[in-house]
Image: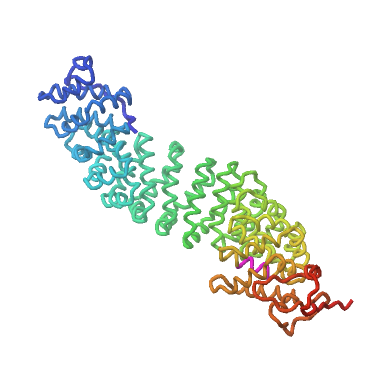
Amino acid sequence: MGKKVKKEECPPKDVFDPLLIESKTPATVVLMLSSPENEILAKACDALYKYASKGDENKVTLLGLGALEHLYKLLSHEDPLVRRNAVMVFGIMASNHDVKKLLRELDVTKSLIPQLAPEEDVVIHEFATLCLAYMAVEYTTKVKIFEQGGLEPLIRLLGSPDPDVKKNSLECIYLLVQDFQNRAAVRELNVIPPLLGLLGSEYPVIQLLALQTLEVISKDRETRILLGENKGLDCLLNILENNELHDLHIKTLAVLGNCLADVHTLQQIQLTGGLKKLVSFLEVSTVPDIQKNAAKAITKAAYDSEIRKILHWEEVEKFLLSLLEANNDEVKVAASQAISAMCENIDSKCVLGLQGIPQLVQLLSSDNEEVKEAVVTALTNLTTASPRNASVVAEAEGIGPLMNTLKAQRDGAISNAIAVLTNLSLQEPFRVSIQSHGIMSALVRPLRSTNSQVQSKAAFAVAAFGCDADARTELRNAGGLGPLVELLHSKNEEVRRNACWAVMVCGSDELTAFELCRLGALDILEEINLSTTRKNKFSEAALETLLDNNLSQKYSRMGYLSSSNFITNGFYDCGQIKPGEKFLSLEELSKQELTDRRAIIFINAK
């Protein structure tokens, strides 16, 4: 801020000879600001301008001498030269933080905004807008400029013949529109035509500021409509087609990215052939920032089902798949996220699955943890409710890399790797293959995670793979039942439900059921089922399964067995236990001393 965009002009020769004052000390010059003579006032202001221009230290000195309070009175001086020179001092001084603080206290915007009138000198316009641009960084000043009617003259000055005035006014508007209220106001004041006009400026700094301002205001749907009506979309596409303006391409794409998120605007771009042009431009670009921002814009836009359809018609999937081959990790992350978003469209999901899954599987071996997470998230979305895509993952030899991803550092990568493996488990051959890779042992660590998403996915996977007796044995031997039982205590409803489901599945054989009971699963499930808010259909079914596969305990707790329960070797009746009382194993009972209580009946037909 404050850098000129045009060449410095020599000061007018008829003003005064600066040598008359520069020999004086700053304190003396400040005293001269109280002079009744216009010529002395003008010369004093000019000397202070030059002194302040030499550095921040000089600005602080003038602040301490009370120069600003004197200068403030001169902002409304009847002599145009005095007023001009006073405004120049404010413009150059406002870059200092402490100066800005005092300017806010003096409410200097109230005196500066009238200086933006069309009849005022261009130098006054330049330095008044410079001062406002420095001050508009602060929210309180933004409010004042809005309330004091500063937006209208600032927008008018975008048409000034002076490039510095244009730049300062534009910078001020850019800062003001960060606030939603001002975005609506500049739209009403018809800011779009002058902004689009500035895209043709010979000064790159002005072009860039105009694009940055358009990027902010095009977040609002009403502005996007106005952009279309003012041929703004064509203007933006023309910039992309001009290789000489390559330094503006990233910001131009940012504006177009906002437009992609609006169905009405996107349809306009499509009807005029603009979308084809845009996709063609993106396909040949090798600039990582352009590729990354384009993918991010597609991700944002693809949340709308109609937009997903349009993007699919324009074959945007081909562009996204090409980005997976980019030699830049940020681009790969953005492309994977866009693929995840586009998967919501069934047709896109098919295209991306067949052509993209082999590439995504390869990227699972990336050293970059963020890439790994984005890629495996895309695979989750591609394989959910899609047996064909699940088959493609298996055929691309994805099971091994997915198993390795369970050791990733990021929780998102772990939970999504589990989700993909669970999606694959719905098909018997893949489930067997995954089990041969030691899935149950690999799930023990995720079961111990502190992340509820990882816990939930891990418990769900245990339920999916636990239907196999060998898998249950593996989990039991790997020490996975303990952390699974702990998840029954979870305050997270999804984690608790999935843990109950996993316990129900794993409790379907006697050895595992006995171990789960030993670890306290029965007591926890009984407690859950007593709560109207915590119980669920799986908690009730899990309790029933555990008891049906541990008949000694069932009989001791309930006092009866069902007609479907068959007593086998190892059953024992130690009498009914009271609620909260521990059920003892045969080994524990055998260590007790003999009493006169009734004998324990033990079935041993062998």
Horizontal and vertical percent position of residue 294: 49, 48
Image quarter in which the C terminus is found: bottom right
Horizontal and vertical percent position of residue 313: 52, 59
Question: So how many labels did they put on this image?
Answer: 0
Q: Which residues are magenta?
A: 497-504
Horizontal and vertical percent position of residue 404: 70, 51
Horizontal and vertical percent position of residue 237: 42, 46
Q: Is residue 50 left or right of residue 227?
A: left
Q: Main secondary structure of the magenta part?
A: helix
Residue 88 lies in what quarter of the image?
Answer: top left
- Residue drawn at (58%, 74%), measured in percent from left and top? 530
Q: Nearer the viewer, residue 442 or 209?
A: 442
Q: Nearer the viewer, residue 3 or 279?
A: 3
Q: Is residue 355 left or right of residue 116?
A: right
User: In this view, which residue lies farthest toward the front?
Assistant: 596
> Does any portion of residue 478 appear in the rendered image?
yes
- Residue drawn at (63%, 68%), measured in percent from left and top? 524
User: In this view, which residue lies farthest toward the right?
Assistant: 606
Q: Say if the magenta span includes residue 502.
A: yes
- Residue drawn at (77%, 70%), measured in percent from left and top? 585
> Does any portion of residue 538 appear in the rendered image?
no
User: In this view, which residue lies farthest toward the left?
Assistant: 36
